[in-house]
Each structure stands twice: as structure tokens, then as C-alpha cells.
Amino acid sequence: MTTITSNSTKTFRAVLIEKNGSEQSTKLIPVKQDSLPSGDVLVKVEHSTINYKDGLALTGKSPVVRSFPMIPGIDFCGTVVESSHKDWKPGDRAILNGWGTGETRWGGLSELAKTYGDWLVPLPHSLSSQQAMAIGTAGYTAMLSVMALERHQIKPSAGPILVTGASGGVGSIAVSLLSHRGYQVVASTGKLEAAGYLTSLGATSIIDRNDISAPGKSLQKEKWAGAIDTVGSTTLANICASLQYGAVATTCGMAQGLDFPSSVAPFILRGITLCGIDSVMAPLNIRQEAWKRLAAELDLRSLEAMTVTIPLDEVQEAGHRIVEGKVRGRIVVDVGI
Ligand code: NDP
């Protein structure tokens, strides 16, 4: 194993996950700069975030981390300090989401990150680094989901759009984006005390997630013109069973479970469509479009209202809270405090 800590002056602070047998430990430590992975762009990270997947990595609840030791953090935003890539030069501001960052290669919960210029998206001028990470992978995934509904011609006039896991990161931003575009948004949540919060983001009504989480019939009353699902499992099966004729649901998450105990009935009798959403390997042009639209369309006051900012030494505790479903909205990590 490479030695990654030393007395060398060229170190940076990072959260490091190590594994010894089945035991996983996480520390905030100085790491040698020359142990950074290969790449053609070095970024001074300003902000990162805690997404659900980061929670899984930090707690070891799912095998998100594929090699150890690992600096977690599936996304980051910062300033380029060195580059041999033709599109990036020192001083450029950049966002990175996914591409295995924080899973197979060192990630954003760190003062420095080495990556590839082909993976970076320019930070839109209207966003600060803190705002970009308040959006983070969660918000970018919410936008990919909205874009999928639009690609399938689901218009605001079609009827109500259901958003599940609505008080979470993807859900909160999806509610805000859909509302801004004039959709009627029904927010499903397990935190009924978050009703006021969801209404302030633009939800027109709230339902209790327990109403749609237990196994149900494969064809139910037609309710939704569209849905953005973040929880999977029986909830997604029930959503498919209650989509209107020709309606579309997107699936990006598995907060309830990875299983999908559904039937072909709503697909072949009601012509519904289920769109998979992947943020990790999405092509650069789609990322650029999503970020451009986020910068133009997301209500920054709503974004601020849904965000808390923490320092690097609080990420472990935040990781536990997010996998326990206790987080409302988004957590930004300010790497400099
Ligand atoms: P959050 O933890 O912020 O939100 C998830 C929400 O799901 C919770 O806040 C809660 O909302 C709800 N929830 C939690 N546990 C359960 C449960 N047992 N049953 C039903 N609902 C539950 O996570 P994110 O918003 O960051 O991510 C949501 C999902 O999307 C995750 O599974 C994540 O891995 C996935 N994801 C996938 C991406 C992709 O590229 N495909 C990219 C980004 C995220 P409430 O209390 O309001 O019901």
C-alpha cells in the first residue's frame, strides 16, 4: 500500500476511509500531495457535499467504495491550480460530479483533487462554489429527471407530478424545479412536519409516503401524469401502477430498496414509460445542459432555504444522518473551515 501520510510540507487535509478486514475507519488527516491519483487537472476544492451515496460510503452501509484507502466525496467545486488539459487553465472554476469519484478514485471531501479535464463542467457565472455544491449531484440528478419528463412531452397541463423522497436532496430540488416550470407537484414524504418546507419549495399538496410504500395491486387508480422517484422498491411499483395512460416516471434512487416488485401490466395496458436516470456516467453535453438550466432556472432563495453548511470534520456524522433518512434538503461541506 502507498504511504499517504508523512511529515512532508506538501500535504493537504482530507477525509480518508481505510479498511482493515471488515472494519472501516474514517479520519480527517494530512495526506501527501504526491499520493494523489493520476489526472490532467489539479483542483483546489472549495466546497463539496454530502449526497446519499456519500453517506453510504462514509458509513460503509453499501459497497460504494471500491478501493481503499479512499477519499470520499462524489462531487466538488473549486479552482484549477494546475492543468495539462487543453480546455482548462489555472484560475478556471470547475464542477465535478461522479465518474466514479469518491468510489474508485479519490474524491471531493478534500482540499485538493486530481481529475480529468474531460470530466469537468465550468462553474456557471451566476453560481458561487457554495451554491453549486448546494445543488451538487442531487440537484443535477433532479434536473436530469425533469429533462427526461420533458423529453417525453410531459407538459404542466398533463396533470399532477409526484415526487418521492421529497424532503431529501434530489426530491427538494425536483419539487422546486417542477414548480418553477408550472407543474402541479405532489410531494411524498415520511416527514409530515416538513409539509410547510415542501409547500415553500412549490409543492401543491403533500402525501404520506406510507400511503404508497406497501405492496399494492399492479393496476391502481390512474393519478399521476408523471413522477420523479428517488426511493425505488414497492413505492416505485405503486407509482407505475397509478400512472395515467401514457404517463412517464423517472427512477434514480433506492432509499427504500433496490428491488422493483412490479408487473408488466401498467406498461402493456396503459403504455407507461419508466426512464432510468444515471448521473455518474452521463455524457458531458448532457451535464453541460443540466448545469446551464440549473443556473438559469433554480430559485436560489429556495436553494438557500434547503441548505446547511458544515466543515470537513463533521462529514462522518452527516453521513450517518443521511443514510438514516434524517436530513432535510442539502448539506454543503465548506472545505476551507
Ligand atoms: P436523501 O437522503 O437526501 O433523500 C432521500 C429521501 O428518501 C429521504 O430524505 C426520505 O425523504 C426518503 N426516504 C428515506 N428512507 C426511505 C425509506 N426507507 N422509504 C421511503 N423513502 C425513504 O438522498 P438524495 O436525495 O441525495 O438521493 C436520493 C436517492 O437517489 C438515493 O437512493 C441516491 O442514491 C439516489 N441518487 C441516484 C443518482 C443517480 O445517478 N441515479 C444520483 C443522486 C442520487 P422523505 O422523508 O421526504 O420521504
Image: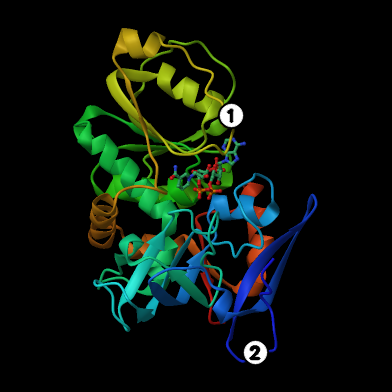
Q: From the viewer's perspective, is 74 left or right of 281?
A: right
The quadrant holding residue 304 is: bottom left
The quadrant holding residue 163 is: top left
2 or 1: mark nearer the eye:
2
Please name the colour scheme applied to the rendered image: rainbow
Mark 2, ligand 1, within 8 Å: the answer is no
Residue at the location (22% across, 37% down)?
Answer: 150
Q: CA distance from mark 2 to mark 1?
A: 54 Å
Q: Quadrant of the C terminus?
A: bottom right
Amino acid residing under circle 2:
Ser
**In front of the other: 176 or 82:** 82
Q: Which residue, given by chain and number where applicable, does mark 2 sit on?
A: 8
Amino acid residing under circle 1:
Asn
Q: Which residue, given by chain and number where applicable, does mark 1 sit on?
A: 210
Give x and y (percent) for residue 29: 68, 77
**In front of the other: 260 or 42:** 42
Residue at the location (44% across, 48% down)?
Answer: 170
